Amino acid sequence: MKAISFVVVLAVVAGCGGGGSRSDYRVTRMASGPISDACISSDRKARSPQLCGCIQAAANVELSNGDQRMAVGFYRDPHRAQEIRQSDRASHEAFWKRYSAFVDRAERMCKGV
């Protein structure tokens, strides 16, 4: 259930706005890439090119290309997010910390988009 929550947070709650101390994300508030493509292809009602592009911009700041590929899988298989979050593997724990930072940034950046 938490996996679904994180995916929903990613796609829906990412309508949250600027703020925070770092300004690197303000340069690009809309970007294209794998997260944006997965977001646009999803069946979520709140999706839009602007919102999905903003979420991608947050991903570009917080996630590596490999992290983004793993996160894209959460759109297709939300249960996978739960598996990664609960995994005992150090690499999964490190990924989840980066992913959580990405979700937080997307929430702040994309408010009102």
Image (spheres, helix red, strand yellow):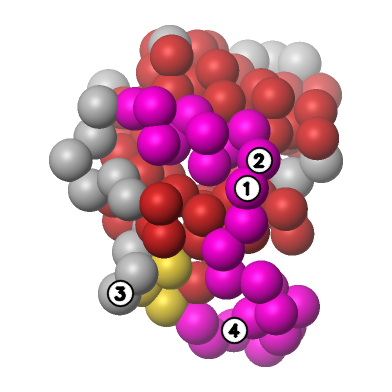
Judged from the image, the secondary structure of the residue bearing numbered disc 2 is loop
Q: Is residue 44 left or right of residue 95?
A: left
Q: Amino acid at mark 2?
A: Gly
Distance from disc 2 to disc 1, alpha carbons, whole Å, reads 4 Å
Distance from disc 2 to disc 3, alpha carbons, whole Å, reads 21 Å
Judged from the image, the secondary structure of the residue bearing numbered disc 3 is loop
Q: Nearer the viewer, residue 113 or 3?
A: 113
User: Measured along the vertical axis of the image, is residue 29 above or below residue 10?
Assistant: below
Distance from disc 1 to disc 4, alpha carbons, whole Å, reads 23 Å
Question: Residue 102 location, x and y as percent?
Answer: 60, 53
Observer-side mark, 1 or 4, equals 1
Q: Residue at x 76, y 16 (%)?
A: 89
Residue 63 in magenta? Answer: no
Give the magenta part as a residue range. Answer: 18-42
Q: Residue at x 76, y 78 (%)?
A: 24
Distance from disc 4 to disc 2, alpha carbons, whole Å, reads 24 Å
* Mark nearer the N terminus (1 vs 4): 4
Q: Do residues under tags 2 and 1 come within 8 Å of each other at their CB atoms? A: yes
Question: Residue 74 location, x and y as percent?
Answer: 49, 22
Observer-side mark, 2 or 3, equals 2
Q: Amino acid at mark 3?
A: Gly
Q: Nearer the viewer, residue 33 or 18?
A: 33
Residue hosting label 1: 32
Residue hosting label 3: 112
User: Which of the labelled discs sits on residue 20, or is there none?
Assistant: 4
Residue hosting label 2: 33
Q: Residue furthest left?
A: 45
